[in-house]
Image (cartoon, rainbow, N blue to C red):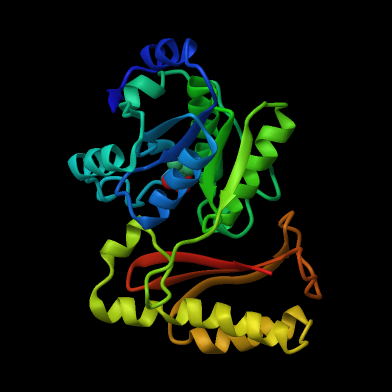
Amino acid sequence: MKIISNPFELKEQLKGQKGSVGFVPTMGALHEGHLELIKNAKRENDFVVVSIFVNPTQFLEGEDLDKYPRRDEADKIICELAGVDILFFPSAQDIYANDEVKLEAPNVRGYILEGFTRPGHFSGVLTVVLKLLNIVSPAKAYFGKKDAQQLHLITLMVKQLFMSVEIVAVDTVRDKDGLAQSSRNVYLTPSQREAALKIPTALYSGAKLVSQGVVSVDEIRSKMLHLLSPLKVGYVAIVNRDFEPIKQIEIGNTIILIEALSGETRLLDNIWL
Ligand code: PAF
């Protein structure tokens, strides 16, 4: 596995690359969820690039940028063992200039749910993903369904900017107890982790209500909110796959999303129906 930090060097390296390139962008602290993205990329491409870059522009003032988990050496070993061909490991100076061209997330879908809690977050995500995709020029890029709004906005960006890459959505990986894998889970104490299990429980019971024939979004939301107590809930939202609000469940076109705090840790999870 080659480790490259300079974007121009990576572009040069990939220029003569034969076969298809699959790309997995990450912020490191790799877990099973990332490995699933890498596995998919390996299965579907001849050559796999992973990036590790804790992108400062997607963190708001006062968020956890400085304490975001960093496990660079372990991550390198994980990538090597997973059969990654190139690990792209840039610094902030490699990616950003002083006077930047800015990409702005869409006014509505970029500023609801996560975008409401973290205004500007998705502009940072889209900017860095656009840069990374331009550097790597992959045939396919892999993102987790767990960050469903991020996945939606990236898919929208690729479409609206007429980009050639295919965005591949990969299922969420859960621990045995049902908690969705996330780099931020390391912040949880055992009791906070126990409390966090209310999130997948509420999602599964929402899905169960749907399987029992309940279609009213209001009814499902209020039952789920009840199950999440006493967690501090940011939102329980039920939207279609274009992230538009709906009144009735449409099977095959619905996502139920939760954002909740366990202790100080903000957790996201969702289920696609
Ligand atoms: O999901 C993430 O890890 C990040 O938001 C991403 C897509 C790598 C952009 O920094």
* Quarter, ligand 1: top left
* Quarter assignment of residue 251: bottom right
Place of residue 90 in the rendered image (x, y in percent of width and height, measured from the top left): 33, 26
* Residue 105 visible in the current orientation: no
- Residue at 70% across / 28% down in the picture? 161
240 in relation to 94, above or below: below
Q: Residue furthest left?
A: 73
In the rendered image, residue 54, in percent from the top left (x then y), is placed at: 35, 39
* Residue pictured at 73% horizontal, 89% vertical: 212
Image quadrant where one finds the C terminus: bottom right
Q: Can I make out residue 35 in this image?
A: yes
Question: Against 237, is 142 above or below?
Answer: above
Say whether residue 175 is left or right of residue 239. left
Residue 101 in picture, x, y percent from top left: 55, 21
- Counting the numbered discs, the total is 0
The structure residue drawn at horizontal position 60% and vertical position 44%, both measured from the top left corner, is 168
Residue placed at 53% from the left, 42% from the top? 142
210 left or right of 81 in image: right
The x, y position of residue 207, in whole percent, is: 64, 80
Give the quarter of the figure containing the N terminus.
top left
Up/down of 56 relative to 172, above or below: above
Q: Is residue 257 above or below residue 200?
A: above
